[in-house]
Image (cartoon, rainbow, N blue to C red):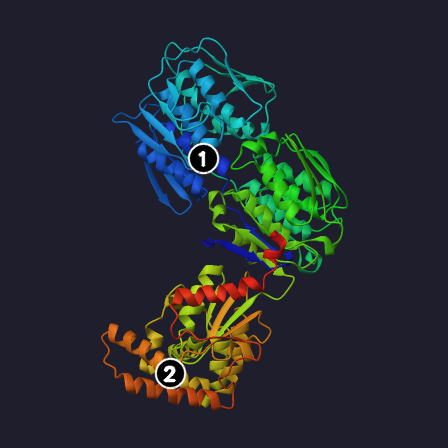
Amino acid sequence: MFDTDFLDLPALRSVHGRVRLPGSKSISNRVLLLAALCQGRTVVRDLLDSDDTRVMLQALRQLGCGVELDGTQACIDGLGGRAPSGQAIELFLGNAGTAMRPLTAALAVLGGDYRLSGITRMHERPIGDLVDALQALGCAISYLGNPGFPPLRIGQPTLALERPIPVRGDVSSQFLTALLLALPLAAGRPDAQDIVIEVVGELISKPYVEITLRLLERFGVRVERDGWQRFVIPHGSAYRSPGEIHVEADASSASYFIAAGALSSDAGRNGPLRIEGVGADSIQGDIRFVEAARLMGARIDSGANWLEVRRGTWPLKAIDLDGNHIPDAAMTLAVMALYADGTSMLRNIASWRVKETDRIAAMATELRKLGATIDEGPDFIRITPPASPQAWRAASIHTYDDHRMAMCGSLAAFNPAGLPVRIEDPKCVAKTFPDYFETLFAVAQPAVPVPVICIDGPTASGKGTLASALARRLGYHYLDSGALYRLAGLAARRRGLAPEATNEAAIAELARCLPVCFDADCVRLDGEDVTEAIRSEAAGMDASQVSALPAVREALLELQRGFARLPGLVADGRDMGTVIFPAALLKVYLTADAAQRAERRHKQLISKGIPAKLDSLRADLEARDARDQTRIASPLKPAHDALLLDNSQLTIEASVDQVLDWWQARQPFQAAKA
């Protein structure tokens, strides 16, 4: 996950390959609660690992459920339909509506002493219609803040279930889902009658209720319904664990990759994008996004649990669509509309306004930044795309702490103008798809060269520390070029190859595909942490010998250039800007003097308990500078377009801030936001 303030996506051309999606959020949290309400153990496979499911799992632990996690598998030991005993329980549910609404209903029916709260945005999301319904059937529930909104306090109920229970259906289907999940707990009482729920008004997001009904059946409760207005839970209903249940991949998350496949300009040459884990047999309503994407011109083939997508009609066809049945996935259509042949309209989407943010207002604001003309109303959004490639604008997309705004915003990177897009607060995708950007980059092809920042300078100038810190701030890959010759020498030794001319061809072949990764503060070779191993005196001697082999130098040149991968690269060395990446967007050359560098090195060695003399260190550095500056191959010198940074008196933080300022000045986003 990209834990950065922003993430810059260069313009993208296409996607191809295979994508395996994480489990569905809607299914995951429903299944977890159902498993908790059962007697015995339920094994949940392919569970989504995200903020929302972590919130639910933590709540279940606090309520007394046994929870064992092993990757994407969870074992839940349920409560058996009984309220947990003991002291008051305070549950913090973040911004997870799929936890707040169902837990509110289940705990209100079970009874106890609970306080349910969340982040500020959760306290702005309405829950009054659900609370009204629960109070009407005898639940003890009250507001701890603004009436109609969390936080809530729940006490012991006096249930009265003889009359139909009314609940509004035109604000959020989660209110009905919450009652459907909770009321089977009361249907099993000896004196229970059939429990009837009546929906007041038009029920929105019916496919999400369909998910609930199907999962209830898996857990032993069959709800009878009369259309979408009346639901009957038969008396005697009781939850029974299925023993094991599989969570299918998230259809809402699939929408972004379906869109990306439809936008891919060269998918015909490289083949379609295959999406695995969800397909024609999905129980999720958002699978109907496939129909909408086909209406816009996408070519989509499908099987039981897979989809294959490629570009079809181009430009895409404008649509006029009632998005009520796919409220989450319909957001993706709003961005696809930027690539359409006319004005598109998404109607009946009032529920967008009470989601993680006011999604109609947010989408309108951000699409306007990109150059679109937008009209919005209480329950609709009308999108007219930019009139030409030249009318597109680079934009910094504000995400409103809303995962779907971030993922939708990434699709703007396929714009025909070849402009980058900035996603603010990219870590908000952790709510449902923590690895979204990594998954996208694994299948995406850039439309422009991947952005590279080069940090060059003499020995002990701090270039490695600066470059790695900069890479972390930007979410870019990091290349420590100075370590590669040491790694090549180490790999050769491990293969039984002495670093000498007779083994040049074999070592070069080894170096060409060296399985190296620079991860935070460690260097990994084929997954093993070799940070200390390559710093030994023997490794240094091997590196010197390896670097004298021309074929190895050529192989490592190719390897280094291969580090330029999405979303970008920060590379440090002595010839990054002059030889390896001469077209880099930003080149920085550090010019700290030898005396200052010697002092830094002296402090470093002393802190490790290694004796050192300051004068000797300075003499060694000056001698090495002279050798590096006069060598025939790739002499140490600034690139002609490098910016000089004297970091003799600067802290690492100040150096990073300076380079970031230079980098920001070269980006188009500031002008776009003005």
549 or 275, which is in the foreground? 549
Residue that appears at 53% across and 30% down: 211
Residue tagged 1: 29
* Image quadrant where residue 82 sits: top left
Q: Residues within 10 Å of mark 2 (few under 14, many from 20)?
A: many
Q: What count of labels does the image hold?
A: 2
**Image x and y of residue 581, in percent:** 56, 74
Residue tagged 2: 594
Is 419 located above or below residue 463 in the figure? above
From the viewer's perspective, tell me whether residue 582 is left or right of residue 381. left
658 or 157, which is in the foreground? 658
Residue that appears at 48% across and 46% down: 428
Q: Secondary structure at mark 2?
A: helix
Q: Secondary structure at mark 1?
A: helix
Would you say residue 568 is visible in this rendering?
Answer: no
232 or 293, which is in the foreground? 293
From the viewer's perspective, tell me whether residue 420 is left or right of residue 69. right
**Image x and y of residue 468, in percent:** 43, 66
Residue that appears at 25% across and 76% down: 606
* Image quadrant where residue 389 sits: bottom right
Q: Nearer the viewer, mark 1 or mark 2?
A: 2
Residue that appears at 31% across and 34% down: 62
**Circle 1/circle 2 CB separation < 8 Å:** no
Is 603 located above or below residue 440 in the figure? below
From the viewer's perspective, tell me whether residue 422 is left or right of residue 39. right
From the viewer's perspective, tell me whether residue 50 is left or right of residue 210. left
Tell me the CA gap for discs 1 and 2. 59 Å
**Image x and y of residue 275, in percent:** 59, 48
What amino acid type is highlighted by mark number 1? Asn
The disc label shown at residue 533, or none: none
What amino acid type is highlighted by mark number 2? Ala
Is 458 located above or below residue 415 in the figure? below
